[in-house]
Structure formats: structure tokens, C-alpha cells
Amino acid sequence: MERLTGLDAAFLYLENPTNHMHVAMTMVVDPSSVPGGYTFENLKEFIRSRLHLVPPFTRRLVEVPLNLAHPVWVEDPDFDIDFHIRRIGCPAPGGRRELGEMAGQIASTPLDRSRPLWELWVIEGLKQDRVGVVTKVHHSAIDGSSGADLMVHLFDLEPEPADPPQVTEREAEHIPNDIELLGYAAVSRFRKLVALPRLLGDTVGAVNRVAQGRRDPTKAVGAAPLTAPRTSWNGALSPMRSVGFARVTLEDVKAVKTAFGCTVNDVVLGLCAGTLRSYMLAHGDVPDTPLVAACPVSVRTAEDSAPGNKVSAMFASLDTQLEDPTERIRAIQACTVGAKEEHQAVGADMLQNWAEYAAPNTFNLASRLYSSWGLADSHRPIHNVIISNVPGPPFPLYYAGAEMVAAYPMGPVMEGVGLNITVMSYRGSVDFGFMVDRELVPDVWDMADRVKGALEELQEAAARLPLEVIDEAAADAPEVAATRRDEVAHVATDLPPANQAPMRSDLS
């Protein structure tokens, strides 16, 4: 038995008929590398042989009577793999849009809480004889970092699957009765009561540090929640989801990063900003104030490989009101520096500590009333979009012997914010997964297809940078200018022309 943390449980309490709190990933695999050939039965048997390495896949929830404390995880004594792994066919012609349509339908239904909270859908009939795999797991069980760690057990570095560690025989886990669960609830409440004074003191100190930083005009600051303008995708959610994909090369992203002297994450935010600005221009509604992005941040230590959520959040502006892409990415760069400093001032575990005090019944009732009454339409958005960037491996991975050729992550939308953009690098590509509310964003592919245009815009801006960058560096340090001159000139030379044909995405 393992207790859910407050943050894990919060994702359960937030869920309601229109707000599904699962994360997902759509993979495209090439089965031509499978030793002996691909069959659905062999793929299912491969997953079955490794389930003991992935704890969230074999345990289910047990709720405390009267919801007096957070639920607990227990091993499911009635586990049935056939309920979790399903096989469907993709409509012709089996391209990215058809695959995205299937992924959107899968993402539109909640998970069954009486069973382990995951599903895996094998989608056959894709172009080039490839196979799609959509994996859906509840956010209460994993975050981006722990999900990547756990999924490692389902991948190999060679087409020939390695023999998994043997299953250790053990007795069936005891399912706690109501008396035991109530005793656990009493102990949990006592511990929270004891910890509350210290948490209040830490919170007051954190708020004071952030306020002092914002009063200092020389310090960069992050974006603030509840300052976001309203967009077409900010509003009350429907139950239905749509999914779109985009892909650019990692080499191009790194070239832009080098040219502007920023981070890869800044470039990802810049690409999202350019994409959304282009989309809003086409729909005639570009706000004159910056969009605000909520960016999940992993606070997991290198030694911590336990399932569950170890995340916090920082808020960054996307500055979509700026027409000049150079000004836009410079503003984003400055904001992310400030956001990171404020995140450190607040403390990595502040969100997790306060989540422990989420009252299950009150929290869930508030979530349901907020959704059913459409209250998200009646106030300024807390933020406009959720953007998450997850680094992936630079080498090929194999899934039951099939080479993974693309991996599109899909994070959940939240009430009032019908757009989530999750990004993952893999080998030489950067894959974008757009998860949207279908009613708020009825044309997700129109949005996703603008990522390449946003990259070309940054490339053109980078090609115009050398003199500006050199002059700025020379004003501060001539020796830095010389190095920077060589670096920027090299990058500008290597940038592809704006009219170059866009890179073909997988299954395009």
C-alpha cells in the first residue's frame, strides 16, 4: 500500500466530466525491425512481461471512507491486461491527421477508476506499414519526469528485446479495510496539523521575497497569473478533445538558440509564441498584452525515481503582441530568467506542501461546480496556455522490437485553458503535441501547421543578427565580441533560406 501525495490526489479531485486529468503520448513505430515480424499478440505479451517493472500499471486506487484523507494505491488482485491494451484500425489513408483524430477520440474519455489508471491503444493501418501506439495514464500516477523513467522499462536500445528481470514471487498485497483506512486518515490529519505553522511561516517568507523582487526595477520578473488576456481557447471546457502534431529538427532549434544566445527552452517558448501569434492573426484577435504560459517544472532530484508527481510551475510571458520576432524572443528570454528566480524564491516544494491540505470532498465539489456553471467564462483567465518541454533521448529506441520513429506527447487541458502544448526531443527531432478542447479550438491542425512558419520567422531574424550582436558584445567586452562574431557568422551561414521546402514530418 502506498499513500498518494496531496499533489497526486489533487489531479483526481480536479477531474470531472469535462476535465480529464490524464497524460498521453502518441508514438509511431516501424515494425520492419521486429525480429520474426510484428503481431499484436507478441506486442501485448512483450508488455505483459515487463508490467512488474512499471508499478502504476498494476495498482489501483482505494478511497478512504468519507474521503477523510487522500486515497492509497494497492496492487490490483483482479488485474486483467486485456482491459488495458486494445487494438483498432486507422482510417485511410493512415496519415498524421487520421492518427491525430484517433488520439483525440482516445483522449476524450476518462479512465475507469475501479482499475489501474492506464490504457494502451495499438493503431494499425498507418502509412508506410507503420503502427501507432497511444498510451494514456492518469496524472495522479505520473508526471513527465517519472513517466519518462517508468517508460524506459518498456523500451530497448536494440531491436532484439532484452530479457527483463525475473518477477520476484511475493504474497498478494493486503487490501486495507475501512477501520485501517480511517486510522491512516487520523494519523495523516494529525501530521498536517503539526506541520501547518511552519508551512504558514515559509509561505509568508516566500511571498515577501517575491514581492521584494518585483519592487526592484533592476530585476527581471516572471509573468503573473490572472494578468492573461482572453483568447478564443480560454473558456469553459467540453468533454471532447482534438490532437495535432508538428515536428522540426533539433539542429534548427539549436542553431536559433546559438544565434540568440538563449536556451533551448526559450526557443521552444518562442516557437509557441510565433505559432499562436500567427494563428490569432489569421482569426483577427491578437491581444495587445502578452499571453501568459504556465510551464510545469520538475523538482525531482536525480536520486528520486519513485512514481507520482514532483512538479511545480512557473509563469512566462509569450509576448505575442510584439511583431518583431527578435524583440519577442528577447522579451521571452528576460521573462524566463525572472520566472526562474521567482520560482527559486518561492521554493521547489511549496506547491506540493500546500496540496497536502486539499480537502477531497470540498476540492472535488468546487471543481464540478466551477465546470458545470461555466465560471471560466466569467473572469479573466489565470493563464492562457500550458507549455511543457520534456527532453528525450538522442538515440533510437525500440518498442517490442519496433523502432520508434516519432513520439508526440500530449498533456491535459484544464478548466478555462483549452490548449496544452507539450514538446519532446527525440533523436534529431523536436516533436510538438497539441491537445485542445475541440469546441474551443475546432481547427487544431491549422494551429499545429504554423510551427514551421514560426521557426522560419526566427531563422530569418537570426540571419539578420550578426551586426547587432557584435555591436552589443563589443560595447561590453571586445574579447567576447571576437568569439561571438565567429559563432554567429557560422550559424547565420548554416541557416536554411526562408523559402526552403519544410521538413517532412513522419506520416505527412
Image: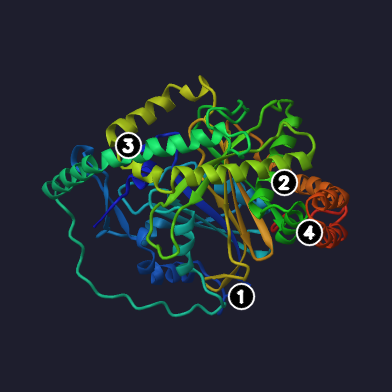
Dot 3 amino acid type: Leu
Task: Write down the residue under mark 1.
Answer: 33
Q: CA distance from mark 1 to mark 3?
A: 57 Å
Q: CA distance from mark 3 to mark 4?
A: 47 Å
Q: Nearer the viewer, mark 2 or mark 1?
A: 2
Q: Nearer the viewer, mark 4 or mark 1?
A: 4
Q: Position of residue 405 (x, y in %)?
A: 64, 64
| Kind of element beneath mark 1 | helix
| Kind of element beneath mark 3 | helix
Q: Residue furthest top?
A: 378
Task: Write down the residue under mark 2.
Answer: 451
Mark positioned earlier in the residue sequence (4 or 1): 1
| Kind of element beneath mark 2 | helix
| Front in this rendered view, residue 30 or 475 | 475
Task: Write down the residue under mark 4.
Answer: 480
Query: Is residue 140 rendered to the left or right of residue 320?
Result: left
Q: CA distance from mark 2 to mark 1?
A: 31 Å
- Label 2 with label 4: CB-CB less than 8 Å: no
Q: CA distance from mark 2 to mark 3?
A: 43 Å
Dot 4 amino acid type: Val
Q: Nearer the viewer, mark 3 or mark 4?
A: 4
